[in-house]
């Protein structure tokens, strides 16, 4: 299996590293437009192979998409990260042009690839890649839900003082202030989380999750990379190993949840064909209302992208 990661910044390099050391594919191509950076990071990852004992070949290239040809999965991490004080949506005009041109190149050289978008603003960059690629919606998706649920699960593990391995959670909506964590669909070792954590504490954890990316931007002056890189690699693994794992993934909704033509996170089964199935949860009125707020917000930003596309 050949996997390409476009963008050798922190997230892309972390994703390539995880793909390599977990031997998720047998070849990982890391591509960047900055001369030498992808080559250097890929070489560094390859030189770690004798220490960590893996044999995934990791190759770095400067903007040469012919070297990515016939990739099975392509992860797009290109674009600027945000700085303190910025929202993800502030990145749209810069990142839209980058994601569009990257997607054109990806599709030209790997027409059968499954594309995973990581660039922000995530939901709208997934929209951008999807319309540019002209591929079915099952093959172009965004990574955010695994990251957001991971943050939520980590915070819960701290609160309960238990292993994060035992926390299962689901979350929907956009990757931003309107995301919809679902405590009703959160369990700890099979026990509903609501039986273990008091409502005020749970509300505080949900709120911290919603602002989880911003908390890290504030601390580090730039966006996070370890959890985002691993989350994208986990999606690749589910696809290349046809694991049929159930994850929240950003995709175009076409009537599911009574939402049409909007890119939002929803639970899906991920396997060799990409999105194998969309799972429709029974949401209560409060959850439906939160999802509607998210739909409105993402739709607004999709319209900003439409204007950018029209003008170019
Ligand atoms: C994240 O949630 O870590 C990413 O979307 C990056 C960001 O700017 O928050």
Image (cartoon, rainbow, N blue to C red):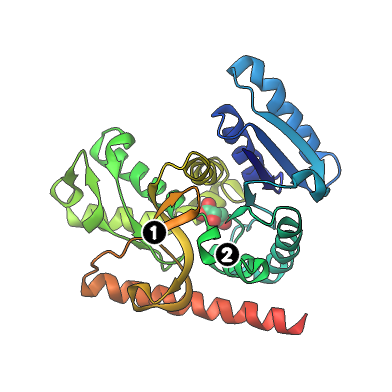
**Residue 250 visible in the snapshot:** yes
Alpha carbon distance from label 1 to label 2:
18 Å
Q: Residue at x 39, y 54 (%)?
A: 209
Q: Position of residue 202 (x, y in %)?
A: 25, 54
Of circles 1 and 2, which is in front?
1
Q: Quadrant of residue 107?
A: bottom right
Quadrant into which the C terminus falls: bottom right
Q: Residue furthest left?
A: 195
Numbered disc 1: secondary structure: strand
Q: Is residue 68 above or below residue 199?
A: above
Q: Is residue 6 left or right of residue 206?
A: right
- Around disc 2, counting alpha carbons within 10 Å, would you say few (fewer than 14), some (14 to 19), or many (20 or more)? many
Q: Residue at x 21, y 38 (%)?
A: 189
Please name the residue that numbered disc 1 is placed on: 277
Numbered disc 2: secondary structure: helix
Q: Position of residue 235 (x, y in %)?
A: 49, 46
Please name the residue that numbered disc 2 is placed on: 126
- Around disc 1, counting alpha carbons within 10 Å, would you say few (fewer than 14), some (14 to 19), or many (20 or more)? some
**Which residue occupies the foreground of this view, 158 or 123?**
123
Q: Quadrant of ligand 1?
A: bottom right
Q: Is mark 1 within 8 Å of ligand 1?
A: no
Of the image marks 1 and 2, the number of the one nearer the N terminus: 2
Quadrant into which the N terminus falls: top right
Q: Residue at x 76, y 64 (%)?
A: 101
């Amino acid at each position: 299996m050949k996997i390409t990661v476009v963008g050798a910044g922190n997230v892309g390099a972390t994703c390539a590293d995880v793909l390599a050391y977990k031997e998720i594919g047998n070849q990982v191509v890391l591509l960047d437009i900055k001369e030498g950076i992808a080559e250097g990071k890929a070489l560094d990852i390859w030189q770690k192979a004798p220490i960590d004992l893996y044999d995934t070949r990791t190759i770095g290239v400067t903007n040469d998409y012919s070297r990515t040809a016939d990739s099975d999965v392509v992860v797009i991490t290109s674009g600027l990260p945000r700085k303190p004080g910025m929202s993800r949506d502030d990145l749209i005009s810069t990142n839209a042009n980058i994601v569009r041109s990257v997607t054109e190149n990806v599709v030209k050289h790997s027409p059968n690839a499954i594309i995973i978008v990581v660039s922000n603003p995530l939901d709208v960059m997934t929209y951008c890649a999807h319309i540019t690629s002209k591929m079915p919606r099952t093959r172009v998706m965004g990574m955010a839900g695994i990251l957001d649920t991971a943050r939520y699960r980590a915070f819960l593990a701290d609160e309960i003082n238990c292993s994060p391995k035992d926390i299962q959670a689901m979350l929907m909506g956009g990757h931003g202030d309107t995301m919809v964590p679902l405590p009703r669909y959160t369990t700890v070792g099979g026990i509903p989380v609501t039986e273990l954590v008091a409502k005020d504490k749970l509300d505080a954890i949900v709120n911290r999750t919603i602002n989880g990316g911003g908390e890290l931007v504030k601390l580090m002056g730039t966006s996070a990379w370890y959890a985002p890189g691993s989350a994208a690699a986990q999606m690749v693994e589910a696809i290349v190993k046809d694991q049929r794992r159930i994850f929240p993934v950003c995709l175009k909704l076409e009537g599911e949840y009574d939402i049409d033509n909007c890119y939002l996170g929803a639970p899906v089964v991920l396997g060799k064909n990409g999105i194998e199935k969309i799972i429709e949860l029974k949401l209560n009125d409060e959850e439906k209302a939160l999802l509607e707020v998210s739909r409105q917000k993402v739709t607004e930003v999709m319209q900003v992208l439409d204007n950018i596309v029209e003008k170019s």
